[in-house]
């Protein structure tokens, strides 16, 4: 059987590629695993993903030799503002290389930066269209900024220069702000979950904050790729507090800038915006205070003049009232004198009439008393006789009752009285056999000794 060695077979592949793929080709792909080796060559993997499943459907190793890498990276940076790094989609001119040891590889000899910009713009527009379709794109923009705006929850990286500039500018303003950092990753693949986690923490205490500021310093445009996320933009758009963004430099825009309540270019611009609003509030308070002071002073002056005028009117009115009351008093005094004289005369007449009636009544009572005294002895005699007769009759009735109750009369009727130890017996309960008892009859006594006792009643 005829056969080829691996070297011969690789040579055959190399010759076939050289014959079939003589020219370079422009292809679109997504960068992955981009790194620059110590020798200056840039190595990467080109991949293609399915639109719906996001699964990798094609993969190829690629490189840019160090002779071209500085020029191509500068061209890409100037055209897009980004470095060549994983996650970017590019339009690249490639040649096919085949190495006996390293196998098939694509040699990148040219890059069109405009394609990358166009792809990013397309992706961003797709996100914005979806947010608008969901009806949430303007929700955060429609939230009114509270007054005053001085309780700010900041989402940033603790060591970021942008956060330091923001905090320093706020502190140097001399105005009162309450600022708290909710730390998050501000570049790379963890931007989306990290910022969403910070928003969730702030959402637990919305009553404590007036607004949220998402800030980071400058850097390459590719550093902002983590902010080009539908999920992050949707969270920002639907957040219950107004969100201010200060991400990157003047030329940088991200999807969340389009949905945030207020878009500002840099962290220092966010600080300036807050300071300006707070200063306006302070100026307004000062102006209101001055106007209030002027209004109060005017009211005091008006009240002082009113009091003065009222005092004069009261003095005049008091004099008039005093004079009028004096006239009324004199008139009342005269009326009282006349009424007093009339009343005295009337009371004197009444007193005289009463004296006459009293004298007449006294004489009549004395005459009646005299008549009563004349017949009183006779009435006393009759009453005494009646009382004596009543008492005599009562004594007679008592004597008859005593005679009826006399024991001797009871004995005459055939009854007897039995005693034991001098006491009359009413029951056999107090007796026992051998006791001596005495029975009294009308004529004489009987002494007996108890032999037996029966408690039964006779029928």
Image (spheres, helix red, strand yellow):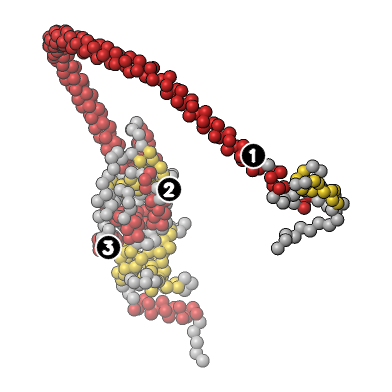
**Label annotation for residue 402:** 1
The residue positioned 28% from the left and 40% from the top of the image is 147
Q: Quarter-wise, where is residue 152 in the image?
A: top left
Disc number lying in front (3 or 1): 1
Near mark 2 (Cα within 10 A), the count class, few <14, some 14-19 or many ≥20, is some
Give x and y (percent) for residue 314. Answer: 16, 14
Q: Earlier in the sequence, mark 2 or mark 1?
A: 2
- Which residue ends up furthest to the bottom in the rendered image? 1
| Cα separation between marks 3 and 1 | 128 Å
Give the labeled residue for mark 3: 134
**Front-lying residue, 195 or 187:** 195
Q: Earlier in the sequence, mark 3 or mark 1?
A: 3
- Residues under numbered marks 3 and 2 in contact, where contact means CB atoms less than 8 Å apart: no
Give x and y (percent) for residue 419. Answer: 78, 46
Looking at the image, is 214 positioned above or below residue 122?
Answer: above
The residue positioned 33% from the left and 33% from the top of the image is 175
**Left or right: residue 335 compared with residue 282:** left
């Amino acid at each position: 059987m005829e056969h080829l060695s691996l070297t011969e077979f690789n040579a055959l592949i190399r010759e076939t590629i050289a014959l079939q793929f003589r020219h370079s080709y422009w292809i679109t792909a997504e960068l992955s695993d981009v790194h620059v080796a110590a020798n200056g060559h840039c190595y990467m993997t080109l991949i293609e993903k399915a639109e719906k499943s996001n699964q990798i459907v094609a993969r190829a190793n690629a490189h840019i030799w160090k002779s071209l890498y500085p020029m191509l990276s500068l061209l890409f940076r100037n055209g897009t503002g980004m470095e060549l790094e994983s996650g970017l989609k590019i339009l690249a001119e490639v040649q096919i290389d085949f190495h006996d040891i390293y196998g098939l590889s694509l040699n990148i000899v040219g890059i069109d930066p405009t394609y990358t910009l166009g792809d990013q713009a397309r992706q961003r527009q797709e996100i914005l269209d979806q947010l608008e379709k969901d009806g949430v794109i303007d929700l955060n923009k429609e939230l009114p900024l509270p007054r005053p705006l001085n309780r700010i929850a900041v989402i940033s990286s603790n060591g970021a220069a942008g956060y330091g500039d923001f905090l320093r500018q706020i502190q140097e303003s001399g105005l009162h702000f309450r600022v708290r950092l909710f730390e998050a990753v501000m570049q790379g693949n963890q931007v989306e979950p990290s910022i969403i986690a910070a928003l969730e923490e702030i959402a637990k205490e919305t009553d404590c904050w007036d607004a949220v500021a998402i800030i980071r310093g400058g850097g390459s445009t590719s550093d902002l790729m983590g902010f080009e996320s539908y999920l992050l933009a949707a969270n920002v758009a639907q957040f219950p507090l107004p969100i201010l963004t200060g991400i990157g430099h003047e030329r940088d825009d991200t999807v969340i800038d389009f949905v945030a309540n207020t878009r500002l270019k840099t962290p220092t611009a966010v600080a300036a915006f807050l300071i300006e609003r707070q200063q306006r509030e302070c100026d307004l308070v000062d102006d209101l205070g001055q106007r209030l002071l002027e209004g109060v002073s005017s009211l005091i002056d008006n009240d002082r003049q009113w009091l003065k005028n009222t005092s004069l009117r009261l003095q005049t009115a008091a004099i008039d009232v005093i004079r009028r009351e004096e006239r009324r008093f004199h008139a009342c005094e005269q009326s009282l004198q006349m009424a007093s004289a009339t009343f005295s005369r009337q009371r004197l007449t009444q007193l005289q009439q009463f004296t006459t009636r009293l004298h007449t009544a006294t004489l009549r009572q004395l005459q009646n008393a005299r008549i009563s005294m004349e017949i009183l002895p006779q009435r006393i005699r009759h009453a005494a006789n009646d009382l004596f007769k009543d008492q005599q009759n009562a004594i007679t009735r008592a004597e008859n009752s005593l005679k009826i109750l006399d024991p001797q009369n009871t004995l005459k009727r055939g009854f007897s009285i039995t005693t034991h130890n001098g006491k009359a017996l009413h029951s056999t309960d107090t007796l026992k056999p051998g006791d001596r008892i005495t029975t009294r009859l009308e004529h004489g006594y009987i002494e007996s000794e108890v032999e037996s006792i029966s408690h039964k009643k006779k029928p």
